[in-house]
Image (cartoon, rainbow, N blue to C red):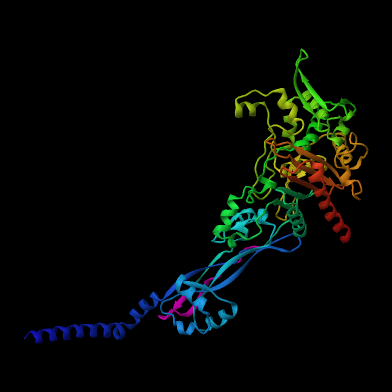
Amino acid sequence: MRYKITVTIFALMFAILFLFLFKMQVLEYSNYRAFIDSLMQKTRLVQGTRGTIYDRNGLKLAWSIKVPYITYNRNFDISELERYLDSNQLNTLISSGKVEISKVQLREIEKLGYDIQFKEIRNYVPYVFHIVGYVNSNNVGSYGIEKTYDQLLRGKLGSELILISPSGKIRQKILKVPPENGNDINLTIDYPLQKYISEEIKKIDNPGAVIVEDVKTGEILALVSYPDIEKPINLIDTYEWRKIINNPENPLLNRATMGLYSPGSAIKPLIAISGLLNNESTTTTINCNGQFTYTSSSGKILATYNDWLLSGHGKTDLIKALRVSCNVYFYNLALKLGIDKIKSVATLFKIDKKTGIDIPETEGLFPDKHWKETKFNEPWYPGDTIITGIGQGYILLTPLELLNFYVTIANDGKVPVPHLLKKDKIEIFNNVKFKKEIWDTVKQGLIEVTTVGGNIQNRGTAYQVFKDFKVTVAGKTGTAEVGKGKLPHSWFVGFAPAHNPKYAVIVMFENAGSGSEKAAPFARKIFEFLFQRREKNE
C-alpha cells in the first residue's frame, strides 16, 4: 500500500512538471523566450577615447591607447581558449577574472564570439609631469592640464546592447548610442626646449625651477620643476610611490608655480621703481663702503647691515646700484621710502598675486605693517623695511610671479596672462602706466648687469656670464639668504633682446649659491638654445 502511494505521488509530480514544461515550451513559448532572452542581454556603457595633448609643434605630450582584454565566464570553453592564450594569460584570466590580450589574439578570439572589452591607458612623454599632470584610474583628469581641461579632453559615453549565449559568448552587439572621443588640445609648450632644459638641470641635480615665456603673448614655452616624476603615475607601483612621497626633495611640488621663495636682489628693480615714482633722482649718489649703519635720531648705532661686497662699490647712483646689485644703496632707498610706499608699488604690479596660469599656483606674499601685526602681533620695525629693500625678510614669491614682474618691465607695463593652452586671443593680466623714462631707466640698469665690465666694484653681476653673448640680455641676478647654515637660493631673471624683447627667462636653484655663479650661466644656456634655433629658422 505504502509503495503504491509513493509511486502515485511521484507520477503526479512528474505529470505536473511535464505539463509545466509543455506549457512553457509549447503553449507560452514566445512569452518565456522573451524572458529567457532578457536574462542573457545587457546594456554596456562605452567610453569615448580621451583627447590627445600636443605641444606647439604638434608633438604628442599625452595620448591614450585602447588595450583589449577578456573577462572570465565560468561557461567558457577553456580548452578552446588554450589555442590562443598562453598559460600565464589563462592563469591570470581564471585567478583575477580578466586578462589583457594582443591585437593578434584579439582578431582570433573575437571570431569565436568571446566578449572583448577595452581598457584606456594614458601615455606621457617624460619631463612634463608638472605641466600635463595625470588622470586617475577612471581616466578623469586629477592634476595639471589634464584636470584644468578635463571637460574638453574627456570622451563622451555611448552605449551598446549585448546579447549573450548561455556559453558566455557574444551573440550580437547592437550600438545604441555611439561614444564620442574627447577633443585634442595644443599647448604653448615647446617640447624640444622643455626636454633640453630638463636634461641640463638633471645634470646639475639641484632642486629648482625654470620658466621661459613669450613676453608679447604670455605663452609659456617651457616650465620645468626639478626634481620631476618621469614615469607615468599609472605605472608607478606602491613601493615607488612611497619613495616619491617620502623624498625630502619633494618631486611632487611644482616649484615654478607653487614654490615660495625669498627673491633676494631680483626684487631691486621694484625698489628702484618705487624710488623713481617718489621723485628719487637717478643722479643721486651714495658712497658705498660695504656697510650700512642704521642709527637712532640721537646718533646711536642700532644695527649694521653688510653689502655683499665688503670692500664696497664706491660712488653709486641708481643705475649702477642695479648693475652691481649694491645692497647699501637699496638699504638707504628702502628706509627713505618706507614700507607703505614700497608696498603700494608692489600692489600696482600685483607682484604677489596669482597670475591666472591654467595649472595650480600659490599666492605669494609681499608684507606690510598690517600683515605683520596680524600674523605676529608685532609692530613693523625699520629693520624690516631695510631688508625688504634687498628682497629678504618676509617677502615670498613664486618663480612665475617674479617672472611676471619682469615681463611687465619688458613690455613697459603691459603684461599678458601667462598660459599653457594655445589661444587666439591674448588676455591682459595687468597694465601699469608710468612715464617712459622710468621704464627706460630700469631697463638700462638691467642691461648694464650683463654688458658693463671693469673691476668688481663696477662691473655688472652677470657680465662675466654674458660678455661675449651675441644678443643683449637685460636681467638681474639674485642671491637670497635662507639662514640655518644653508647656501642661498640662486636667481637669474631677464629678457632678450633687451630693446625688442621676445623671451623672458627665470632660473632659480634652491640653496645653490650666488645668482651670478649658478643661475645666470644656466640662463645663458637657455638663451643660446633659443636664439641659435631662431637663427636656423630665419
Q: Does residue 370 lie above or below 499 as drawn?
A: above
What residue occupies the far left of the structure in this picture? 1
Horizontally, is 396 left or right of 116 in the view? right
Indicate the quadrant containing the N terminus: top left, top right, bottom left or bottom right: bottom left
Q: Quadrant of residue 335?
A: top right
Q: Does residue 54 lie above or below 98 as drawn?
A: above
**Can I make out residue 215 in this image?**
no
Q: Position of residue 88 (x, y in %)?
A: 51, 76
For this rendering, which residue is in front, 440 or 429? 440
Q: Position of residue 148 (x, y in %)?
A: 62, 53
For this rendering, which residue is in front, 144 or 218? 144
Give the tally of numbered discs: 0
Q: Does residue 335 lie above or below 497 as drawn?
A: above
Task: Name the residue located 13 percent from the left edge and 86 percent from the top edge.
Answer: 7
What residue occupies the far right of the structure in this picture? 454
Horizontally, is 123 left or right of 283 in the view? left
**Can I make out residue 384 in this image?**
yes
Task: Name the residue located 72 percent from the left edge and 23 percent from the top edge.
Answer: 382
The stretch of residues the image draws in magenta is 162-183
Q: Does residue 146 lie above or below 504 as drawn?
A: below
Horizontally, is 506 left or right of 19 in the view? right
Residue 179 within the segment the image draws in magenta: yes
